[in-house]
Image: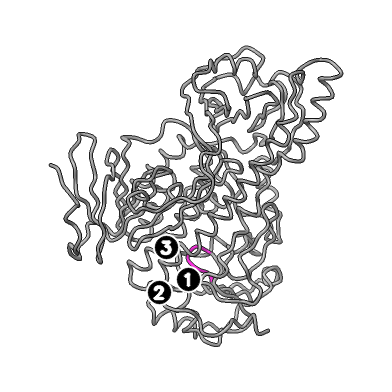
Amino acid sequence: MRHSLNSVDTPIGDASDFDVIVAGAGPVGLTLAIDLGRRGVRCLIVERNPTTAPWPKMDRSNARTMECYRRIGIVDRVRALGYPPENPMDVFIVTRLCDPPLAVLPYPSVAESRAGIASCQDGSLPLEPYQLVSQNALEPLLKEVAEATLNVTVRNGCELIDFAQDNSGVTVLARLLDGSEQLLRGAYLAGCDGGVSTVRKKLGIKLEGRGRIRDACQVIFRSSDLYERIPIGKGRHYNFAWPHVETLVVQGSRKEFTLHTGLPPDTDFEAVIRDIVGFPCEIEIRHVVPWRHHLLVAERYRDRRVFLVGDSVHLLIPFGGLGMNTGVGDAFDLSWKLAGVIEGWGGPGLLDGYEQERRPIGLRNRQACEWAAASVPIWRKLITPNVRDVTPEGVAARATIAASAKVHHRRMHDMRGVELGYSYAGSPLIAEEADNVAEWDTCIYTPHTRPGVRVPHMWLKDGRALQDLLGEEYTLLDLVGRFETGSLEVAFREIGAPFDVVRLGEPRIQDVYGCKALLLRPDLHIAWRGDSPPDNAAALAARATGWGEIDQRSHWERK
């Protein structure tokens, strides 16, 4: 049966089949659906493809994403699908895999990172290290988790082709694999449908920045013995000092690989790969994906009841691995805000806060990707035809390239500040403090508790992680064990927002955090801090829940 939305220009009614319809079941859409379901939100996720993606795209879930996956209880299952914890994460600059490397950039394995985290007492390290896991391994797990999550319905082979919104909800026109069409109804719609987003295009929202920067190819191939036979050392990336051949990415299985190259898609890639490997091994070319580099961010993240999430609002060059990871951040920011409004305690400013908080992150991460991408041509322009030669000229060329790559190539792998230090300071949902601005270093993460940042990871005296104590509600974190919380408890209770008090009495954490109490949001970002109760608890609670701005400056500013 064919349906039309042409006549849907007046309210259809208050009843909705679902609270939220999510368009697109990639890692970002599935993550959003899982977190919505956990929060009691009735969610439908529709995906045009009949099954999950067969090919790897992203290869690295960064530390912040892994902290988020810990929050929803799947971090160990994600790690089980990826690169083993003991395997090196080093990055190589090479001419061929059979030749001595020009340079090796050492990076800790997951096991080594965990050891460092276990002994860290100053908040400078995340609770979880990064993880190499390919998208074609991660997506099936997320789909399985979503299907098992209460309140979540997953429909593959169901493509959003149109929608209309009114004052009470959104009606979606979906097409099934057999060509039939269905009308679906939700209170809200989240477009997680990728860079060519139908949702974004239907809304007429433009992308801003630099598009079509360059053409490239991703060559996906399988080899059962390549990784084990590499004689020069094990790593995750092998970057080639050779024309048009750029990076070999080892996927989490160590049997699947992706080669990034500027060569055209009709190239004999098996011959290219055998040349840069330099020793006999099995090679099965499975897929060649032409694609373009973009650095684009949408002009808006929201249109009334419709939200854009992930690649539908930011298209980033994968230098630094900020694409999917930024999208996961979007999902975890939006999920609790939608839940708050649907449950009735969230004010209109709560959903406004999604774009106000996440678009600046998209812009900042676009800038970081551009900075990282600019580092590669610096050393690649030094490649000469004699770079492989066993001659004094070849030796000199390799030494020159190595010296440059050791300095510049690190950019894309050393962006801890972007991953952990981002801030929502300036958001109407965050308490104001003098000189607290949304600025952070790209590479260096310096832990602090100024309102807007993620609460730094700390270990308690009994060995538990602080983040593991914190629930899904607003939390007043009392670091002295006797902080007066009555006024805030009353303020949040009157709004109807979930609120908890966690009393610790942890002098060491208090010293690191530099305050006696923190108000944490459901996403574990700091909404307020102080050494005494806020002068106007009702205004602070209203601000944090989207009902209005605080009318007094924070206690911290008046110290």
Q: Position of residue 531 (x, y in %)?
A: 64, 81
Q: Marks 2/1: CA distance?
A: 8 Å
Q: Residue at x 22, y 57 (%)?
A: 17
Find residue 336 and name its label.
Answer: 3
Report the span colored magenta.
520-524
Q: Marks 1/3: CA distance?
A: 11 Å
Which type of secondary structure does the marked residue at label 1 adopt? strand
Using the rendered view, name the quadrant where residue 38 is placed: bottom left
Q: Position of residue 221 (x, y in %)?
A: 51, 22
Residue 533 is covered by the magenta coloring: no
- Mark toward the start of the polypeptide (2 vs 3): 3
Q: Is residue 138 left or right of residue 339?
A: right
Q: Amino acid at mark 2?
A: Ala
- Residue with the mark numbered 1: 474
Q: Amino acid at mark 1?
A: Tyr
Which type of secondary structure does the marked residue at label 3 adopt? helix
Viewer-proximal residue among 97 and 125: 97
Q: Position of residue 214 (x, y in %)?
A: 55, 35
- Rendered-image quadrant of the N terminus: top left
Q: Is residue 50 left or right of residue 13?
A: right
Viewer-proximal residue among 104 and 393: 393
Q: Are marks 2 and 3 in contact (CB under 8 Å)?
A: no
- Mark toward the start of the polypeptide (2 vs 1): 1
Q: Amino acid at mark 3?
A: Trp
300 over 50 or under it: above or below? below
Q: Are marks 2 and 1 in contact (CB under 8 Å)?
A: yes
- Residue with the mark numbered 2: 497
Using the rendered view, name the quadrant where residue 526 is placed: bottom right
- Mark toward the start of the polypeptide (1 vs 3): 3
Q: Position of residue 398 (x, y in %)?
A: 79, 25
Q: Work out which residue is located at the far top of the displayed protein and give it.
A: 280
